[in-house]
Image (spheres, helix red, strand yellow):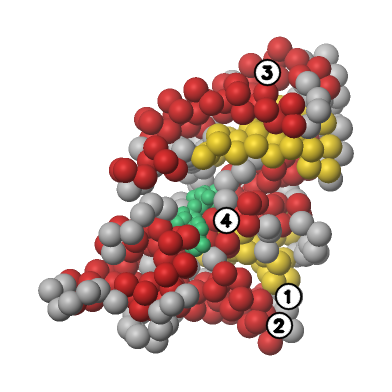
Amino acid sequence: MTKCKLNSRNLLAIETSCDETAAAVLRDGRQLMSNVVASQVHIHKEYWGVVPELASRHHLEDIVRIVEKALLDAKTDRSAIDAIAVTQGPGLVGSLVVGLSFAKAMAMACDIPLTGVNHLHAHLSSVFLCEDVPSFPFLGLVVSGGHTNLYAVNSFLSADLLGQTRDDAAGEAFDKVAKMLGLEYPGGPIISELAEGGDPCAFSYPRAKLPQTPLDFSFSGLKTAVLTSVRKLAGQGPLPVEDICASFQEAVVDVLVEKTLFAAKNYDIRSIAVTGGVATNSRLRARMAEETRRLGCKAYFPYPELCTDNAAMVALAGYHQIKAGILLKKDADVYSRLPFPDI
Ligand code: KG4
Ligand code: ZN
């Protein structure tokens, strides 16, 4: 018999979908008692991207320590945990398996319910861990290293996918452009820092409109245009790195803002939440806030530490699933990608 079926006073969440091993404790679906993240960025930096096998091995090394730290920081222990939420997908299979196996074992040992969370659903939920929160329905943009997805979010348990990237994700484009410019991985933070000293109009890079599916995104043409300009400028003195960064960033921001506002008008939705690692970008935050205001809408952003991968967002999404009785079966598997439409 489970200790606590449809309630979860103390919920432990685990996230291992990519290169962050994370655990968090959420009390009563409101109070974040702990939020621990071990990033593997220093390991994957030298390969210019996440190496799946290295990622899973490091999750295996770190997971016990990270969960123990989350319990300790929350001033609690295993016996006080009433439910577990774990990221089930999408993500790297080997990495997800580490989190799910650990969560299954702990749920069985403690005889408590376990729910499997969609990582993108978790990003959408992250905005509710802040003070100023949107009301349903709202538009949810998830912009990360693996996804650029736009949703109409109806409730904690339901979101309709309106558009997604056809090729590179926005964060992936930042990472690839950084590599072209000889900058470090991940590319987002360094590009946004350098962009501050550059001219966003120095290069006129393309903005893919996709008239047939206007809510879809494409960043591969932009990436190629940056590569072409870098090649053209090679051997003509120092590369205007700051101008390239500012012009590239402006093109990404233009597309994200324009398509999100187009959806807001089309679906008559006034609240917009921007989540995922790219949502830490200060230019994106400023432009989205300003242009949504002009349209009579309001933009919401999670705190920066809740934009990048973390388990707090998994905890909140998992809390609502457990309340609704959505539990994992004993033979549940992970999933690397979502069927269309997802969620
Ligand atoms: O959400 P996240 O931590 O992991 C995934 O689920 O992918 O996002 C990581 C991505 C990376 O591609 C990184 O370059 C990007 O977020 N990123 C940024 C910024 N900070 C991180 N992109 C643009 N500007 C930033 N300030
Ligand atoms: Zn993510």
- In the image, taking residue 334 as reference, residue 121 lies left or right, namely right
Tag 2 residue: 293
Which is more N-terminal, label 4 or label 1?
4
Disc with the residue nearer the chain's start (3 vs 4): 3
Residue 298's disc is 1
> Which quadrant would residue 35 be assigned to in this image?
top right
> What residue would you read off at disc 4?
276
Report the front residue among 69 and 93: 69
Q: Which residue is mark 3?
A: 106
The crowd level at tag 3 (other Cα within 10 Å; few <14, some 14-19, many 20+) is some
Residue 93: % across, % down = 45, 33
Pointer 3 with pointer 4, Cβ within 8 A: no
Disc 4 residue lies near ligand 1 with CB under 8 A: yes
Q: Earlier in the sequence, mark 3 or mark 2?
A: 3
The crowd level at tag 1 (other Cα within 10 Å; few <14, some 14-19, many 20+) is some
Q: Are marks 1 and 2 in contact (CB under 8 Å)?
A: yes
Give the crowd class for mark 2: few <14, some 14-19, many >=20 residues within 10 Å. few
Mark with earlier residue (4, 2)? 4
Q: Residue at x 62, y 43 (%)?
A: 310
Mark 1 to mark 4 CA distance (whole Å)? 18 Å
Spatial separation of the CA atoms under disc 1 and disc 2: 6 Å
Q: Amino acid at mark 4?
A: Gly
Residue type highlighted by circle 3: Met
